[in-house]
């Protein structure tokens, strides 16, 4: 056997279980983009001490047996006191192929790995749009999608324990 070759321990049935697991990015695309300047030109006549609020969400839609559309939604609201200076809404989407994953593992991959792949595209777009709107660059900090997913799973379990209807995690 050559030095670079490795052998995997068989699963007992002669088949390698990892050989059937597949995950791939097929396409990244911008699904929706909105930039709003509610106060118009009046925004530029004020003292600039903004407060930035970030709202994030994901949506997973099954396309067929192996393909999923994952949409990362980011809403950035920049306020000056009680007034909204500007608002950017982005829906960055991707088509992902996932095959051979069990439901809990599939839900985790679709809700953590896929948004993590999409986030840099959405972040760059938000930065670019804010600059084109004549505002300072707005570079969003990294997001830990694994932690967000674990938090959502914990909330779902708590709701189930309390007898409330739980929201569905894809």
Image (spheres, rainbow, N blue to C red):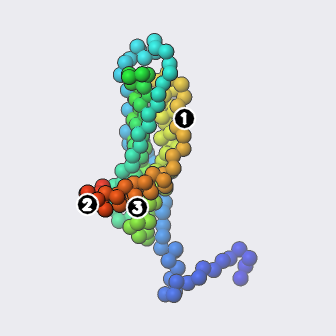
**Which quadrant would the N terminus be assigned to in this image?**
bottom right
Q: Residues within 10 Å of mark 2 (few under 14, many from 20)?
A: few
Location of residue 96 with respect to 126 vertically, above or below = below
Q: Position of residue 139 (x, y in %)?
A: 54, 35
Residue designated by label 1: 139
Q: Which residue is at 52% across, 74% downward?
A: 18
- CA separation in Å, label 3 and label 2: 23 Å
State whether residue 58 is above or below residue 82. below
Q: Earlier in the sequence, mark 3 or mark 1?
A: 3
The residue lying at 59 percent from left, 82 percent from top is 9
For image coordinates 52% across by 83% down, the residue present is: 11
Residue 11 - label: none
What whole-number distance in Å separates the C-alpha atoms at marks 3 and 1? 28 Å
Residue 78: x and y in percent read 44, 28
Q: Quadrant of residue 65?
A: bottom left
Q: In this rendering, would 158 be left or right of 43?
A: left
Residue 107 tag number: 3
Q: Earlier in the sequence, mark 2 or mark 1?
A: 1
Task: Identify the mark at residue 163; answer none if there is no mark.
Answer: 2
Name the side, left or right, on which 31 lies relative to 121.
left
**Dot 2: what SS?**
loop
Give residue 49's position: percent from left, percent from top.
50, 21
Q: In the depicted view, which residue is nearer to us: 33 or 44?
A: 44
Q: Nearer the viewer, mark 3 or mark 2?
A: 2
Up-down relation of residue 69 to residue 13 (above or below) = above
**24 vs 147, nearest the viewer:** 147
Location of the C terminus (image quadrant): bottom left
């Amino acid at each position: 056997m050559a030095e670079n070759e490795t052998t995997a321990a068989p699963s007992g049935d002669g088949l390698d279980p990892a050989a059937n697991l597949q995950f791939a990015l097929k396409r990244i695309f911008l699904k929706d983009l909105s930039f709003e300047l509610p106060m118009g030109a009046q925004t530029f006549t004020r003292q600039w001490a903004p407060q930035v609020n970030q709202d994030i969400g994901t949506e997973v839609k099954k396309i067929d047996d192996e393909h999923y559309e994952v949409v990362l939604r980011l809403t950035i609201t920049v306020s000056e006191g009680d007034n909204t200076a500007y608002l950017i809404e982005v829906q960055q989407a991707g088509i992902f192929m996932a095959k051979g994953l069990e439901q809990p593992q599939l839900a985790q991959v679709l809700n953590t790995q896929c948004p993590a792949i999409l986030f840099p595209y959405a972040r760059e777009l938000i930065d670019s749009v804010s600059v084109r709107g004549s505002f300072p660059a707005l570079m969003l900090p990294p997001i830990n999608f694994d932690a967000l997913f674990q938090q959502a799973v914990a909330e779902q379990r708590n709701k189930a324990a309390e007898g409330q209807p739980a929201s569905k995690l894809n």
